[in-house]
Image: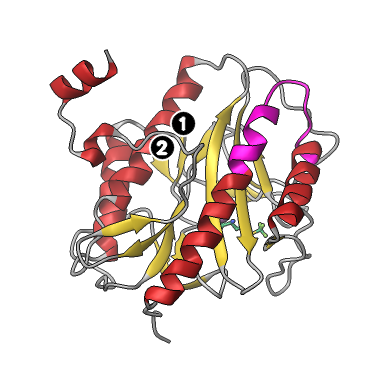
């Protein structure tokens, strides 16, 4: 039971795997629109992974006592928290918010794991706010990462921000170590207390993937054995990056040309400067 420390060659291989995962999301982006089914998104991703020379880590993925997961990726719509199964019967419609979660495996066996939210057509202010706040919460968590920091610092940053904005943090699912193993140690909780938990060391690679609900935090599992929904049917959002702890902080690995901009607070841009920059 120990957390892997990756060397420079491992990190280089993970950079590739993670960029490729992010490029699957880039490729899918123009198809995330009203009238398209999540089944079609699944098929498109399968073809694109084949073209990349990667394969899906999720198809056939199995936990003890559960059926094998049937999708090349996960598509979680509105009150679906995570692990939504793509379906030809699920047509995306105006106003939906959809998480697409992609994990690819390279020929060399490295996993890249990342997810984004997509707003289908014009969405309600509440839905847009949830997606935006969840994105910032993920980045606030990421921005805690440096050697000597603790996993609890990440969870605390996310939880404080989420709850401060009236959102709740799902407890049943967490970030995870990732590399040659899909779901490795450590567990990266999205709630917690500063200075607690595992101390971060250069070369650790893990995901941060908060699931935030507009309503209560409780979730239930559907009879398909995979789909997780909010118990109160409130909207849920999630974003995910894979990253490595570096000597000076972190490097986010799941970035590509189509990644949404890194928030100004991470780039150290002050509000006044941000206003000038975007003008
Ligand atoms: N990609 C998800 C994660 O972030 C896991 C999906 S497992 C599946 O860890 F089987 F549901 F696809
Ligand atoms: Co993950
Ligand atoms: Co994922």
Which residue corresponds to the image point at 45% horizontal and 47% vertical from the top-left? 255
Q: In this rendering, would 150 be left or right of 16?
A: left
> Dot 2 lies on which element?
helix
Tally of numbered tags: 2
The residue that label 1 is drawn on is 131
Pointers 2 and 1 in contact (C-beta within 8 Å): yes
Which residue is depicted at the point 62% across and 73% down?
109
In the image, residue 186 above or below residue 49? below
The x and y percentages for residue 125 are 46, 16
Question: Where the N terminus falls, by quadrant?
Answer: bottom left
Residue furthest to the right in view is 88
Q: CA distance from mark 2 to mark 1?
A: 5 Å
Horizontal and vertical percent position of residue 143: 26, 50
- Asked if residue 264 lies left or right of residue 105, the reply is left
Residue segment shown in magenta: 25-39
Q: Residues within 10 Å of mark 2 (few under 14, many from 20)?
A: many
Q: Which residue is mark 2?
A: 134
């Amino acid at each position: 039971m120990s957390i892997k420390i990756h060397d420079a060659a491992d990190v280089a291989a993970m950079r590739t795997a993670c960029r490729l995962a992010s490029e699957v999301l880039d490729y899918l982006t123009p198809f995330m629109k009203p009238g398209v089914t999540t089944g079609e998104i699944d098929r498109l991703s399968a073809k694109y992974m084949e073209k990349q020379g990667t394969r899906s880590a999720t198809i056939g993925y199995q936990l003890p006592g559960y059926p094998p997961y049937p999708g090349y990726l996960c598509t979680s719509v509105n009150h679906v928290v995570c692990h939504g199964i793509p379906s030809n019967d699920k047509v995306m419609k105006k106003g939906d918010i959809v998480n697409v979660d992609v994990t690819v495996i390279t020929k060399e066996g490295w996993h890249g794991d990342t997810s984004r939210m997509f707003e289908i057509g014009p969405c309600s202010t509440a839905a847009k706010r949830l997606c935006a706040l969840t994105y910032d919460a993920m980045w606030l968590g990421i921005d805690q990462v440096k050697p000597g920091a603790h996993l609890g610092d990440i969870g605390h940053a996310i939880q404080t921000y989420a709850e401060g904005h009236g959102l709740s943090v799902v407890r049943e699912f967490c970030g995870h170590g990732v590399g040659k193993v899909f779901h490795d140690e450590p567990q990266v909780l999205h709630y917690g207390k500063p200075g607690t938990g595992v101390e971060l060391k250069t070369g650790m690679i893990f995901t941060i993937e908060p699931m935030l609900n507009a309503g209560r935090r409780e979730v239930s599992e559907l009879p398909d054995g995979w789909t997780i929904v909010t118990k109160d049917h409130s909207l849920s959002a999630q974003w995910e990056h894979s990253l490595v702890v570096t000597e000076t902080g972190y490097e986010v690995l799941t970035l590509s040309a189509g990644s949404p901009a890194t928030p100004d607070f991470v780039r150290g841009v002050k509000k006044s400067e941000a206003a000038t920059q975007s003008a």
